[in-house]
Amino acid sequence: MLGQLLALLSDGRFHSGDELGEALGVSRAAVWKHMKKLDELDIPYSSVKGKGYRLHDAIELLDKEGIQESMTQRLDCLDILLDVDSTNTWLFERAPDHLGKRYAVLAEKQNSGRGRRGRHWVSPFGKNIYLSYLVTLPGSLNDQEGLSLMIAIAVERALARLGMDGVGLKWPNDVYLDGRKVAGILLEGRQTQPDFCQIVIGIGLNVALSDRDAERIEQPWAALKQYLPGVSRNQVASVLLDQLGSILDEFKREGFGPWINHWAERDIYYKKDVILSGGSEPRIGVAKGVNRKGELLLHTDRGMEVIVAGELSVRPVN
């Protein structure tokens, strides 16, 4: 019933308790009890005597059937959750029962969304895309070199399909608009059999993030609706899922190698002075793109160094 209530309130307008109760087939008291559940989801709303209830911001709820109907790529399972700690954790726990399947889960809200290096991913209700995608790939986990960069390219291609120009990529797998981060990616895997592994691909993509939502973000950020005001979360989800399916097929056929130049053309730090942090000591050099394994090529005073992603982070020197 909570989902039905949110659908009624999603327009951001006032709805009386009587109106909501009639639509849901419950009493006004029951409506009030369900409204209190919005507090648990951190969904801001107003209650005004004589007017009723309204959400502070209109929201577009995710529509499973609409997303699937708009897709062209194969997807075996799709779940949409109202509220979850982490879509990656949720899907990773279920992965052993879905060997060989392409299984995606979207959530309206994450309570403990995770990014790289253990960072918290801000995940307010009904504003963005919180997606995890399970895929089974041949070989070992070590054979999936460059996959995280390919996933970033899939996000970039999805944004281009939606009408965004000038999308930038940052090693190893962040997506930027005008020098501000719009999407982050987290891959987690397990070796299921000697010849196969399962990877859970987590993507957080800002769609309608507000200044109030982003108070805890400690770096410049961007949201799609700043550039595409009429963009639909459901459209973003379906296009993104299609591009993921397509890029995974290409990765299985050819690996990352054919995409080296594509990455360099969109790399926001290509041929720029950068500082690499997160290791035993910071390193400064010039970013020279990536190799066929998706490793960063960093030219330092010691010569050309090859950097494996791990928990390292790249920033401009200035």
Image (spheres, rainbow, N blue to C red):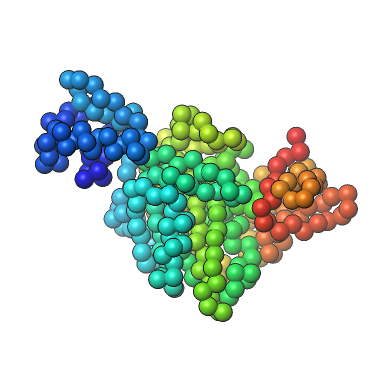
Tell me: residue 219, above or below residue 291: above
In front of the other: 174 or 265 = 174
Q: Is residue 222 left or right of residue 6?
A: right
Q: Is residue 271 left or right of residue 241?
A: right
- The part of the image, by quadrant, that contains residue 39 is top left
Q: Is there any visible trace of residue 119 in the rendered image?
A: yes
Residue at 30 percent across and 50 percent down: it is: 63
The residue lying furthest to the right in this view is 302
In front of the other: 175 or 99 = 99
Residue at 62 percent across and 38 percent down: it is: 179
- The part of the image, by quadrant, that contains residue 310 is bottom right
What is the number of callouts on the image?
0
> What quarter of the picture does the C terminus occupy?
top right
Q: Position of residue 81 (x, y in %)?
A: 34, 51
Q: Is residue 62 left or right of residue 186?
A: left
The residue lying furthest to the bottom in this view is 194
Residue at 76 percent across and 43 percent down: it is: 275
Tell me: residue 297, above or below residue 11: below
> What quarter of the picture does the N terminus occupy?
top left
Q: Is there any visible trace of residue 10 in the rendered image?
A: no
Q: Position of residue 61 (x, y in %)?
A: 32, 44
Q: Position of residue 207 (x, y in %)?
A: 45, 40
Q: Position of residue 56 (x, y in %)?
A: 33, 28
Residue at 53 percent across and 78 percent down: it is: 193
